[in-house]
Amino acid sequence: MTNDFNQQIIDEFRANQGQVAAFDGARLLLLTTKGARTGASRTTPVGYLPDGDRLLVIASAMGQNAHPAWYHNLLAHPRATVEDGAFTYEADAVVLEGEERDRLFARAVEADRGWAEYQARTGRVIPVVALHPIHAGPPAGPMGEVLKTIHGAFRRELALIRKEVAASGPGLGAQLRVNCLTLCQGLHYHHTNEDAGMFPALERDHPELAPAMKRLRDEHEVVARLLARLQELLADDDLDHDVLVAEVDTLATELEAHLDYEEEQLVPILNGLAR
């Protein structure tokens, strides 16, 4: 990508909370590294793969014979800044080697043959890098807007998974399983934090919210059961594709309704709180 094109992507990504029209349906992040020679910060749009508590980025350079600059930068300075559309945080980069690199690259190829095409164009072994996030708290801004941003990230990921599951056919690839499990993990963490922190604080200061809070907690339990059911299905080697599609559709419907109601009830109050 040219620098001008990169900058257009960066600007659109930041203006639209991670959404870029030219990469609709792709998982994209902004990776800011420190120059290996200059020490200057450099931001690059990079595709990524979910992998539980970490993210995977692949230094394909679209099959060119030289590693991309961001990869050389990470070798020299493994601490980078990641923007995912909802959060901006530091991350430690680890270059994967041997069996782990080969297994995860094969997993990526199974999900998207484009990675294999890039590898076929070059004599170098395309590196796979794991980014281990170092979370530094919620984004800046009114709390209600922060909640909407976080919800937006869940909505986008769920929409991607819904499409991927529908298109997967009878065989469910390893990366798609990981995508689903990572979403389950993220939603569980988000709802657990709300139940333990945000909800009690709001109930204490706004007793009039009691009916809404009860409904939201009940919906958390419904979502938790759906997530548990999805994880059971994903662990089944004889997974029924039609059942999986139906379960993901049910989860998407229930979660969308829950997020909409939570924003309707809580965003105005949260935006009025001091940070």
Image: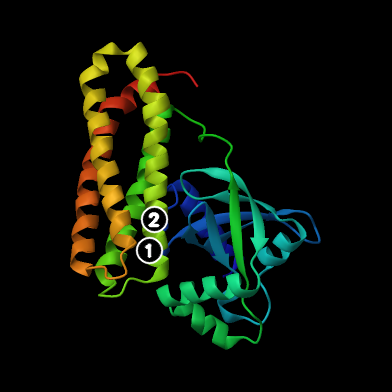
Q: Residue at x 37, y 50 (%)?
A: 184
Mark 2 Cα within 10 Å, few/some/many (few <14, many 20+)? some
Query: What secondary structure is marked by label 1?
Result: helix
Residue type at numbered disc 1: Arg
Residue type at numbered disc 2: Leu
Q: Is residue 1 left or right of residue 265?
A: right
Q: To which quarter of the image does residue 190 belong? A: top left
Mark 1 Cα within 10 Å, few/some/many (few <14, many 20+)? some
Residue 242 location in percent, x, y? 18, 67
Q: To which quarter of the image does residue 119 belong? A: bottom right
Q: Is residue 131 left or right of residue 189?
A: right
The numbered disc on residue 177 is 1
Above or below for 20 versus 256: below
Query: What secondary structure is marked by label 2?
Result: helix
Q: Residue at x 48, y 30 (%)?
A: 141
Residue designated by label 2 = 181
Q: Is residue 172 left or right of residue 3?
A: left
Above or below for 228 versus 199: below
Gap in Å between the C-alphas at discs 2 and 1? 6 Å
Q: Evaluate if marks 2 and 1 touch, with contact meaning CB atoms under 8 Å apart.
A: yes
Residue 126 location in percent, x, y? 61, 76
Residue 86 location in percent, x, y? 46, 44
Is residue 154 in sight in this rendering? Answer: yes
Is residue 149 in sight in this rendering? Answer: no
